[in-house]
Amino acid sequence: ISIPSFVIKICNKVFYKCSKLTIILIPLSVTSIENEAFSGCISLESIDIPFSVKSIDSGAFCECYSLKQINIPNLNCIDEVVFKECYSLEYILIPSSVVSIKEGAFFGCKSLKSIKIPSSVTLIDCEAFAECESLTEITIPTSVVCIGENAFEDCISLTKITFENPSSVSTIGNRCFYGCSSLHEILIPSSVSSIGNYVFEKCESLNKISIPSSLNFDDIGVTNNNIVIKY
């Protein structure tokens, strides 16, 4: 399908569950892609979004199971569940204009092996990368202030989490790294003033958690308190 050049927005659910759609051409006239516009397009493999697009709304590409690659224009945020359960998505480049990665943005992107979070991002919201089962490493840039609940839950291949120094992270939400069963060690930066419950529950391989001595917590989900090292 080739969208005509007089179109300025792709409206809510306009291609919703078009299961045989494999390719679509978006003209430079388009400035916005609205909620669930391509949601459920299970045969869509790739899409080139022009730089004219300034907003991509919630769930726009949710459940595009065959989508392997997509370029993101200079957006302010990656909206809620926008790429949720894009099972085939292997790589995506987040532009440096993005300030927030919202709730469930990449939830269940099981083939996503690596992702670079730009230094513009301040918020990684709830479940942003939950169930990204192929993700092996993540670096949290100095700009990030808050990591929401369940943000990296069940990232079962995640072996390394690095907080860039100096870190600005002040809040790590409940169950943030729950079920990261390949994670061996982690250093929580001294900037963190609040850490939620069950953050490391079911992290069976975890043998060292370095936590600032000033940080108080109730139950971070470890069964062996000897692996918690205060500094």
Image: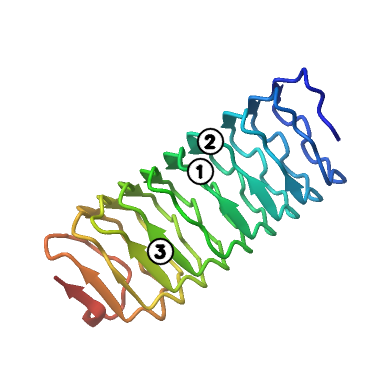
Residue lying at 12% horizontally and 65% vertically, measured from the top left: 213
Asked whether the beta carbons under mark 2 and mark 1 sit within 8 Å of each other, the answer is yes
Please tell me how crowded label 3 is: few (under 14), some (14-19), or many (20+) other residues with Cα within 10 Å: many
Residue furthest to the left: 214
Asked whether the beta carbons under mark 3 and mark 1 sit within 8 Å of each other, the answer is no
Q: Quadrant of residue 211?
A: bottom left
Q: Nearer the viewer, mark 3 or mark 1?
A: 1
Q: Is residue 163 visible?
A: yes
- Disc 1 target residue: 95
What SS does tag 3 mark? loop
Q: Earlier in the sequence, mark 2 or mark 3?
A: 2
Asked whether the beta carbons under mark 2 and mark 3 sit within 8 Å of each other, the answer is no
Q: Earlier in the sequence, mark 3 or mark 1?
A: 1
Identify the disc placed on residue 12: none
What amino acid is at disc 3? Phe
Q: Quadrant of residue 81?
A: top right
Nearest the eye: 197 or 44: 44
Left-right relation of 229 to 134: left
- Disc 3 target residue: 177
Relative height, residue 112 to residue 32 (above, below)? below
What amino acid is at disc 2? Asn
What SS does tag 1 mark? loop
What amino acid is at disc 1? Pro
Residue 21, percent from left and from top:
85, 43
- Disc 2 target residue: 74
Residue lying at 66% horizontally and 57% vertically, measured from the top left: 89
Distance (Cα) linking label 2 and label 3: 29 Å
Residue 125, percent from left and from top:
43, 46
What SS does tag 2 mark? loop
Q: Look at the image and tell me in which quarter the C terminus lies.
A: bottom left
Distance (Cα) linking label 2 and label 1: 6 Å
